[in-house]
Each structure stands twice: as structure tokens, then as C-alpha cells.
Amino acid sequence: MSSDAHAHGAADAHAGTRQGQLIGFGASVVLTAIPFLLVMSGAFDKQATALIIMAFAAAQVFVHMIFFLHMNTRAEGGWSMMALIFTIIMVVIALSGSLWVMHHLTTNMMPMHEMGQTP
Amino acid sequence: MTVAMGTMKAGEPVFYVVDEHEHAEGDSTMLGFWIYLMSDCLIFAILFAVYGVLGGRYAAGPAPKDLFDLSLVAVNTSFLLLSSLTYGFAMLSMQQNRLKAMQAWLVVTGLFGLAFLGIELTEFAHMIHEGATPQRSAFLSSFFTLVGTHGLHVTFGLVWLVTLMVQVKRFGLIEANRRRLVCLSMFWHFLDVIWIGVFTFVYLMGMLR
């Protein structure tokens, strides 16, 4: 019986509250609508727009993690957060590493590339 | 319970618990599933990295500007976001043991998921019809791989959703079903998180290129 109560608690912790769900949804709508409007209207120059929409994406991931996935430092004795932090480190290394290395590779290969292009 | 003995510097004996204590059935499911989601996240990270590297290689073929319809993506995004909200409501109904309400919210979630997939497949079909196939350029190969993998996840999520609805109908809101529904909830919300990356990096950034 006690194990049932425990499992209930675990499941309930993942349900959150109606208010939390609505706050998360409202925030997500705003954080989605603004990047779309910015890109569609072309109000700012490309560099600025790119930085702004990346910041909004990061903010929205944060909102989803808290209000929908109910992440906190206490879930599963902190191990969920540990797994998340480890994954974020791996993601950052994989993404920034690939882009950095491949960007420099492309830059240095440019003469070859142009030679191939010109008839 | 077995206890191993170690020694500290001062020579004081220290005792460690070697055997793990009993876990209730399904007690570690949430953590295990979370770690699965994190591994899935790494798969998507690699696909994003591939798209980041190859996304600008059009091979004189169509560029994002020629292919993407942002208003369609906006509709798609809102469907996925709404499905996350309705799944959240299904979880709240489960918490209150309102079985009928929960099943109804799950149906709504499934319909939003289907609408999302329908729009995505229409978009793919339209692109392929215009000759923008995965074979056309490195940009299109990486685009179809990344967005298609997300779409496949949504498809499997829908299969899982229907399976669980049948399970709940047959066996009610038993402990095992609650656990499964919570796992699917994490899966579904996680897909929404990945979609944030897709619409930002693939569609919005693509239009800026």
C-alpha cells in the first residue's frame, strides 16, 4: 500500500497544476509568436534577428522544462538534473564543436571550392 | 544486508551499504525514462549539428527561402504547442481520477498530433513534388533527416497514445497505466522542446540565410 502511495506521489509530481500549465502555455505562445513576427516582418537586420530568435528559443526551452516537464533540482533525488546537465554539456560540445571545426574547414578549403566552381 | 568495511585515514572503520534497498515496482521508471529522453536529445543534437554544417549547401538547388512557408510552420507549431497543453490537462484529469475527461483530452491531443503530422507530410510532399527531394542537395538531405526524425517520433508517440488509451479502457487507471501515461507525457512535452529547436534553427534561421 505504501508503495502505491509513493507511486501516486511520483505520478502526481509530474502532473503539475492547471495554473502552471496555462502559464507555461501562455509564455510559450508569446515566445513563439515574437520570433515568427520578427522574421516575417524583417523589422531588424538579419544578424540581430538571428540573435533575438535564438535567445527566445532558449527562453522557451527553459519555460517548457519548468512548466511542462516539471524539472527541478529535487526530482529523483537530483539525478534528473544531473542527467540534464550532462546532456546539455554534451549537446553544447557536439553543436559548437561541429560548427566551429566545419566552419574553419570550409573557410580554408575555399580556394579549392572556387577552383571547382569556375569552368 | 551485506556490509563492506573500509578504513579511513584515522583507522576508524567505515561501513558502506553494498546491497541496494528494495525498490517498489516502477520506482525507477521515471529516472530511466528521463535518461532515455536525454539520449534522444543527443541524437537530435547530432542531427542539428549536421544541419548546421550542411544547411547552407544548396548545390545550386532550392534554398530555404524558395521552399518554406512560414505561416504553415506557425500553424504547425501552434498545433504541437496546443497538444502539449491538452496532454497536460489529461494528466490533471488523471490526477483527479476523472477517467472520461482524461480519455477525452487524450483524444484531443491525438488529433492535434495528427494535424501536425498531416501538415508536415503535406509540406514534404509539396517539396518533393517541386523536385526538392532529399537527394537534391546536402541542405535537403539534412533537412529531411532532422525534421523527418522529429516527425517519426511524433508518429510513434501517436501509436503509443492510442495503445495507452486502449490499455486504460481495458484496465482502468491502475498504477502501471498511470506510470505509462506519465512517461508518454514526458515524451510528448520533450518532442515539443525539440520542435522549438526545429522551427528556430531550420525554418526561421533558414529564412534569414
Image (cartoon, coloured by chain):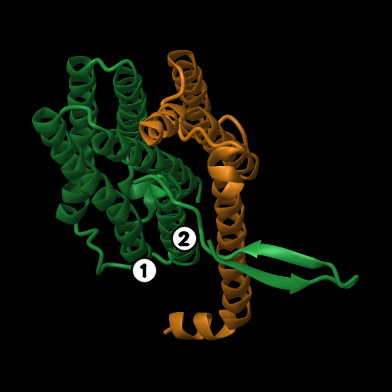
Chain colours: A orange, B green
The answer to which of B161 and A111 lies nearer the viewer is: B161
How many callouts does the rendering have?
2
Q: Is residue B57 left or right of residue B168?
A: right
* Mark 1 or 2: the one toward you: 2
Visible in this render: residue A30? yes
The answer to which of B157 and A46 lies nearer the viewer is: B157
Amino acid tagged 2: Leu
Amino acid tagged 1: Ala
Q: Residues within 10 Å of mark 2 (few under 14, many from 20)?
A: some
Measuring 57% from the left and 79% from the top, which residue is drawn there? A110
In the rendered image, residue B119, in percent from the top left (x then y), is placed at: 21, 37
Q: Is residue A85 left or right of residue B53?
A: right
Mark pair 1, 2: CA separation: 21 Å
Residue at mark 1: B138
Q: Chain of mark 2?
A: B
Residue at mark 2: B42
In the rendered image, residue A19, in percent from the top left (x then y), is placed at: 48, 13
- Residue B146, compared with residue A25, is above or below; it is below
- Name the image quarter holding residue B128: bottom left
Measuring 20% from the left and 46% from the top, which residue is drawn there? B155
Measuring 24% from the left and 36% from the top, which residue is drawn there? B177
The answer to which of A15 and B71 lies nearer the viewer is: A15
Visible in this render: residue B122? no
Q: Quadrant of the C terminus of chain A?
A: bottom left
Q: Chain of mark 1?
A: B
Q: Is residue B34 left or right of residue B133?
A: right
Which tag, 1 or 2, sits closer to the chain's start?
2
Element type at mark 1: helix
Element type at mark 2: helix
Q: Quadrant of the N terminus of chain A?
A: top left
Measuring 33% from the left and 49% from the top, which residue is drawn there? B66
